[in-house]
Amino acid sequence: MTDDITSVLQPEIETFGGIQLRKPTAGTLSLCDFAKLKITSGGISEVPFFEAVAFFYIHSHQVKEVRKSLFDKSEGVDENGCSLKFINSVLQWADDVELGSISEMGDKIGAMLSEAMSPKVEPTGEDQKDSDDTIAEIVSDDPKKN
């Protein structure tokens, strides 16, 4: 029952523009790193629109398909070492997709990254007190302290 409520409140897939987006995971964010996307690390890109489109490509396509194009160096690599096969796949896909303005895209990416990086459970005051008491107990029992 809890999983049903969670999936309604925090769906795994949501629509943005004309595409279905999966939430970022450790795996998809790693793919963003391999794609040399500065957008996910807070860096400033010389090609911000491409990076935004590539982020959406990674989060809307099957991971197996993304990995296949990202690690295929048969067409060469750009000056940053990113696969040209991946770049071409992103650009070909982008020709047929309506995503809106760059600011809307940036806002969506920011929200997705913020949610992915936020802790899912916040300790209550009582939980923190118990944790602090346990740490104090461990420290006071430390034989090196005597």
Image: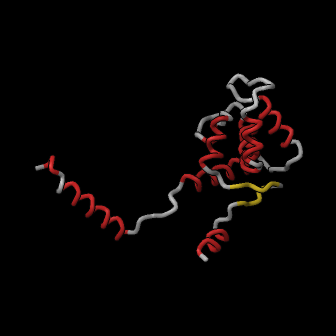
Q: How is the image coloured?
A: secondary structure
Residue 104 drawn above or below residue 12: above
Residue 9 drawn above or below residue 13: below
Q: Name the quadrant of the N terminus.
A: bottom right
Q: In front here: 108 or 55?
A: 55
- Residue 145's spot in the image, x, y percent? 14, 48
Q: Does residue 103 show up?
A: no
| Residue found 85% across the figure and 43% down from its top | 93
Residue 86 drawn above or below residue 57: above
Q: In front here: 77 or 100?
A: 77
**Residue at far left of view:** 146
| Residue found 68% across the figure and 61% down from its top | 12
- Total label count? 0
Q: Does residue 12 show up?
A: yes
- Residue 62's spot in the image, x, y percent? 76, 49
**Is residue 27 toward the left or the right of residue 49 in the image?**
left
| Residue found 64% across the figure and 53% down from its top | 112
Q: Quadrant of residue 44?
A: top right
Q: Quadrant of residue 129?
A: bottom left
- Residue 33's spot in the image, x, y percent? 63, 37
**Residue at far right of view:** 96
- Residue 77's spot in the image, x, y percent? 74, 24
Q: In front here: 17 or 21?
A: 21
